[in-house]
């Protein structure tokens, strides 16, 4: 039985699929910049929200709200899809992707911090990282520094330069909302009203 649910399907048949898992709490301009940059390497980007996360609980926006924000943020971009996955680990998401897309070339899109977790995570079995990276490759954007992958994995990891990822984060957006600061410029314009509704970002408007 298939476990991944496609919420929005791109209008392409990819040979290379970029898989972008995330919490998207909320989606930011950096998320979109990362997806758009990856489209220089892949034919389609699939933005995936897991039903549960391996390293943190669901807080803030609900799954439904995150999917609604993603769909609005993506807008008319014909090469970006949105989906829900049952699993939260990359190897679980990869397995679900193959159920829908078959034998496409999978490229997982992530920041340096997420890539380091992937390469150092305790999967409970020897050789798990080697086996996993035999099934897909990584496109890694800088975030607080660049990734220096172990020599054994360097042919499976490619840098993805996206300068906007350096200073925009979902946690930063939430922090600004809590403090009453300016946050609107950090998220895509189509989702600002929904972000305000979901996270309580009402404040006196003093800037454009």
Image (spheres, rainbow, N blue to C red):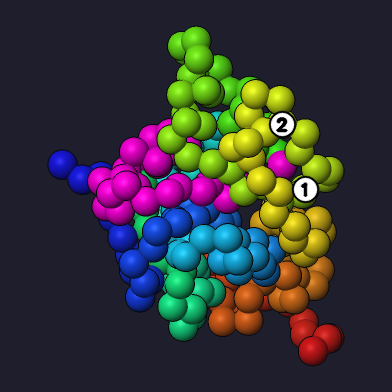
Residue 143 image label: 1
Q: Is residue 22 above or below residue 79?
A: above
Q: Is residue 159 above or below residue 66?
A: above
Residue 184 image label: none
For numbered disc 2, what is the local secondary structure? loop
Residue 63 locus on image (x, y percent): 42, 55
Q: Quadrant of residue 13?
A: bottom left
The N terminus appears in which quarter of the rendering?
Answer: top left
Of residue 12 and residue 172, the one placed in the foreground of this image is 12
Query: Would residue 65 be seen by someone viewing this image from the given angle?
Result: no
Residue 149 image label: 2
Residue at point 67% right, 33% down?
A: 154
Total marks in image: 2
Furthest residue toward left = 1
Of residue 195 and residue 124, the one placed in the foreground of this image is 124
Residue 89 locus on image (x, y percent): 46, 34
Is there CB contact under 8 Å for labels 2 and 1? Answer: no
Q: Residues within 10 Å of mark 2 (few under 14, many from 20)?
A: some
Q: Is residue 109 magenta?
A: yes
For numbered disc 1, what is the local secondary structure? loop
Nearer the observer: mark 2 or 1; the answer is 2
Residue 117 locus on image (x, y percent): 63, 30
Label 2 or label 1, whichever comes before in sequence order: 1
Residue at point 21% right, 45% down?
A: 2
The span picked out in magenta is 86-112
């Amino acid at each position: 039985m298939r476990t991944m649910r496609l919420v929005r399907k791109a209008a392409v048949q990819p040979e290379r699929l970029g898989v972008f898992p995330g919490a998207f709490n909320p989606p930011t301009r950096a998320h979109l910049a990362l997806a758009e940059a990856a489209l220089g390497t892949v034919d389609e980007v699939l933005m995936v929200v897991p039903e549960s996360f391996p390293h943190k609980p669901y807080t803030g926006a609900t799954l439904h709200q995150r999917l609604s924000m993603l769909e609005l943020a993506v807008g008319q971009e014909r090469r970006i899809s949105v989906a829900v996955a049952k699993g939260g680990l990359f190897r679980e998401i990869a397995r679900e992707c193959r159920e829908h897309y078959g034998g496409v070339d999978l490229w997982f899109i992530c920041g340096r911090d997420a890539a380091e977790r992937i390469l150092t995570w305790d999967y409970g079995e020897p050789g798990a990282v080697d086996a996993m990276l035999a099934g897909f490759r990584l496109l890694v954007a800088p975030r607080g520094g660049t990734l220096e992958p172990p020599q054994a994995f360097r042919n499976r990891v490619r840098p993805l330069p996206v300068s906007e990822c350096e200073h925009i984060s979902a946690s930063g957006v939430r922090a600004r909302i809590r403090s009453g600061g300016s946050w609107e410029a950090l998220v895509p314009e189509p989702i600002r009203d929904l972000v305000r509704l979901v996270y309580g970002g009402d404040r006196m408007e003093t800037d454009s």
